[in-house]
Image (cartoon, rainbow, N blue to C red):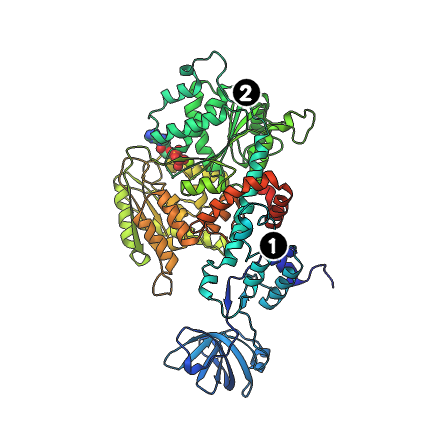
Amino acid sequence: MPSALSYPQKALHKLGLVRDIDLALHLPLRYEDETHISRLRDARDGEQLQIEATVTHSQVTLGARRQLLVTVDDGSDCCTLRFFTFYPSMQKALTVGARLRIRGEVKGGLMGWTMMHPSFQSAGGELPTALTPIYPTVAGLPQTYLRKAVLSGLARADLSDTFAGAAEGEKERWAQWGLREALSFLHQPASDVALAALQDRSHPAWQRLKAEELLAQQLSQLQAKRGRAALQAPPLVAPVGAAADVGLAHRLLAALPFSLTTAQHRVSAEIARDLARPVPMHRLLQGDVGSGKTVVAALAAALCIDAGWQCALMAPTEILAQQHFTKLLAWLEPLGIRTAWLTGSQKAKERRAMLALIASGEAALVVGTHAVIQDKVQFKNLALAIIDEQHRFGVAQRLALRNKMNGVPNSDQDAVEAQREPHLLMMTATPIPRTLAMSYYADLEVSTLDELPPGRTPIITKLVHDARRDQVIERIRAQIAQGRQVYWVCPLIEESESLDLANATQTHADLTAALHDPGAPVMVGLLHSRMPVAEKREVMSLFTSGQMQVLVSTTVIEVGVDVPNASLMVVEHAERFGLSQLHQLRGRVGRGAAASACVLLYSTGDAPRLGETARERLKAMAETGDGFEIARRDLEIRGPGEFLGARQSGAALLRFADLSTDGALLEWARSLAPKLLDQHPELVQRHIDRWLGGKAEFLKA
Ligand code: ADP
Ligand code: MG
């Protein structure tokens, strides 16, 4: 063989299926019942069917679309098979007279039964006795190959018990369904099992797997938490003798043009308590868009700086970082605090100057993008790292920031130094319900801002069909006439970035033309991800200063901006966005006192109406403006595997368990984890390795 791995093997690796246990844990998406042959006469419209029939007619039509039409007869009725893509080998197998076993969804209609792209093989041969599993797969990895690989992985994998025998009462609970029994069953369920219990994962075999998975997640987080408790961090308290009311935080509060909300007070106190302890803080600050997280971060920074240490704040994009910088500068510089700014696009000379300020400790606060964690950046005494929009950062980046505490990375010049870590405050605007967060994040303290600053007017959300675009443009004119500003967010076109750009450019041109008014010129700007940073900054500053009335943007990422005068947000092809993305976008307006609106333009394409989940998402947006309620609905619509996994940490953490329905199992795992960790460390290690493999290190960040 020319290369070490064959094509399907490479595809297996792409799916992360490397070890035997990975294969064994690759569970079916659904099952097909191929254990018996049905008759067409008994078929119901839309039913998944397996028949055996003889080809009576075969023809390639050359209409608008070339297709292969094959008629088959099973003795009870006829059915037309349609193929839009086909190969000569298929045509050969489907010649008149051939007897075939065919599987697919039958549709009734004027022309009788039809099946689109059914699968087929020659008739006869034994029927399977178990349901046929259908696995998640990727291109180049046929189900048959994957099935064999999974079964052989299952046969070889070590599936010995890691917890049932280890704690009181657990043995009985899991007696029937060991890991091996559960997996064997789920890969090859008997044909008489209730498909519904398999599909909704309520079957005891599924319960065992979910329990295993949640336990792994709790164990690894608890392990990380205990590891951290052994580390040191500088306690950030005011110097001895300093009166509380002259501290930097106090002076900052006094200088702010507003007073804190109750929620801001509460979470600031939670953070201050953590910072005063000699162990590293590991806290997530969650709060809806606009809930005022920045000032909470600034107060934490003030405590840190007052205690004589440096603080770093990192944001995922240059625009966001710039905005934080401007704000923090305005708040802190008048109080005598030196601030440094770091970004990838900086000129070498400016950058050198900044690096020197940071290394000498003159800059007490460092704000920037990923540039903050580069090797060249050396802090004099970093004690607090704040990460905004933490889910946008990879785990490796979070780890790198934590390592900045130790001056020269990996130097063992001072063994005590190596045991230190900065306090870590992560911020996110994609909250999950508090109780859920507290149980799930065993390794994280959670602070929640559950209140918006006063004086906000609720945002009115309207769903508008794309055909009524003209009315939307009218609305934009009206807003501009009142001196207000408008965002227009272009659709995400996932398959192609250049299409994205072409579309935004077109929209920008269309809007410029539509809003043209010789009497009162309107400036329409364009912002997209591939623009040079300097140009982005230019566009943003025109919009922020109010000179530009309309901002057309492709980049969802860049819109974490704060322009209180903006009162209308238009999202084009809103049906393509995720629920929390839409909510984030909407949060860009309604920041000032003016009545604000969000128009979700949707299109159904060629279909008569929107798909179900898209409809549910848009409906949720129209019905509620509360970020936690949105998060709850998001959880409902999508299931939390995706929710917590991909978004919170860059890789799916929960594949099987579903926090919205498996709360009881989560509680079980949460209470068992400490006992196991105390009494059976070797079992714990085996369990974590099995479930998280190489990923465990990452989960700790
Ligand atoms: P987010 O939580 O989305 O990061 P920001 O920190 O950007 O929110 O705050 C949104 C806006 O609300 C900012 O203009 C900020 O100055 C303002 N703000 C924050 N806290 C208060 C408050 N207690 N009272 C009034 N305005 C506030
Ligand atoms: Mg923010």
Classed neighbour count for the residue bearing mark 2: other residues with Cα under 10 Å, few (<14), some (14–19), many (≥20): some
Q: What amino acid is at disc 2? A: Glu
User: Residue at the spot x=32%, y=33% of the render?
Assistant: 453
Q: Secondary structure at mark 2?
A: loop
Classed neighbour count for the residue bearing mark 1: other residues with Cα under 10 Å, few (<14), some (14–19), many (≥20): few
Residue 81: percent from the left, percent from the top? 48, 79
Q: Nearer the viewer, residue 352 or 619?
A: 619
Residue 687: percent from the left, percent from the top? 61, 47
Question: Does the beta carbon at disc 1 come under 8 Å from ligand 2?
Answer: no
Q: Nearer the viewer, residue 464 or 151?
A: 151
Q: Quadrant location of the N terminus? A: bottom right
Instruction: Look at the picture and state if 318 lies above or below 609.
Output: above
Say which mark, if any, is on residue 362: 2
Q: Nearer the viewer, residue 648 or 689?
A: 689
Mark 1 = which residue? 16
User: Residue at the spot x=38%, y=22% of the render?
Assistant: 253
Split into quadrants, the picture shows ligand 2 in the one at top left
Residue 529 visible within the image: no
Residues under numbered marks 1 and 2 in contact, where contact means CB atoms less than 8 Å apart = no
Residue 265 visible within the image: yes
Q: Quadrant of residue 456?
A: top left
Question: Does the beta carbon at disc 2 come under 8 Å from ligand 1?
Answer: no
Instruction: Compute the Cα span from label 1 to label 2.
Output: 47 Å
Eye-nearest disc, 1 or 2: 1
Q: Quadrant location of the C terminus? A: top right
Q: Earlier in the sequence, mark 1 or mark 2?
A: 1
Residue 322: percent from the left, percent from the top? 46, 33
Q: What amino acid is at disc 1? A: Gly
Residue 293: percent from the left, percent from the top? 41, 33
Q: Secondary structure at mark 1?
A: loop
Say which mark, if any, is on residue 287: none
